[in-house]
Image (cartoon, rainbow, N blue to C red):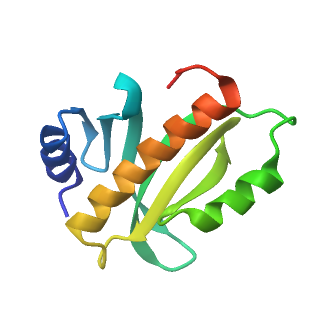
Amino acid sequence: MDLNALMRKYADQINGQFMEYDPLHSIIIVPVSGGRAQTVLGHIRRSELYNRNIIAFNSKVCNFSNDIDLKSLMEQTAFFNYCRFIIFEDHLQVEAVAALDTVSEEAIKEMVQEVANLADQYELKLTGVDVN
């Protein structure tokens, strides 16, 4: 799968912006509601646990702090199609992951859009501002 070609194509379809990083990493700026945009990073990496390549999409929500109600966030993930919350490099993020060899192009588009929408929604909910 050519991640950059797929992300470029999707950015064109949604009037977003695409930035190529390298063959395994790309960035798409996804338009979301209210005239805002959310940055989504796509990357392919090896899952040592399952010994296969996976594709992952991440977007920052906000800096992590101990006053964030993690139990509430975990409960909310039950309503998501693809996403989960993670903490990476001291940031709360939304992430969607799939096996590279079985994921469809349509599912990838849905994953990118869900990551962007949820990151934007929770960013506003937790911080009250549009940061990322």
Residue 17 vs residue 90, the one in the foreground: 17
Residue at the farthest front position: 34
Decide if residue 55 is on the left or right side of residue 109. right
Q: Is residue 109 left or right of residue 94?
A: left
Residue nearer the viewer, 105 or 1 = 105
- Number of callouts: 0
Query: Which residue is located at x 37 percent, y 35 percent?
Result: 32
Could you tell me which residue is drawn at 50 percent across and 35 percent down?
Answer: 120
Q: Is residue 127 left or right of residue 113?
A: right
Quadrant in which residue 131 is drawn: top right
Q: Position of residue 123 (x, y in %)?
A: 59, 32
Q: Residue furthest right?
A: 66
Nearer to me, 85 or 121: 121
How far from the left and from the top, in percent, is residue 38?
A: 41, 32
Instruction: Mark yes or no: residue 89 visible.
Output: no
Observer able to see residue 125: yes
Give the residue drawn at x 33%, y 59%.
Answer: 110
Residue 60, located in which quarter of the rendered image? Answer: top right
Q: Quadrant of the N terminus?
A: bottom left
What residue is shown at x 63% (from left), y 52% (from top)?
A: 85
Residue 46 % position (x, y): 44, 66
How far from the left and from the top, in percent, is residue 27? 32, 37
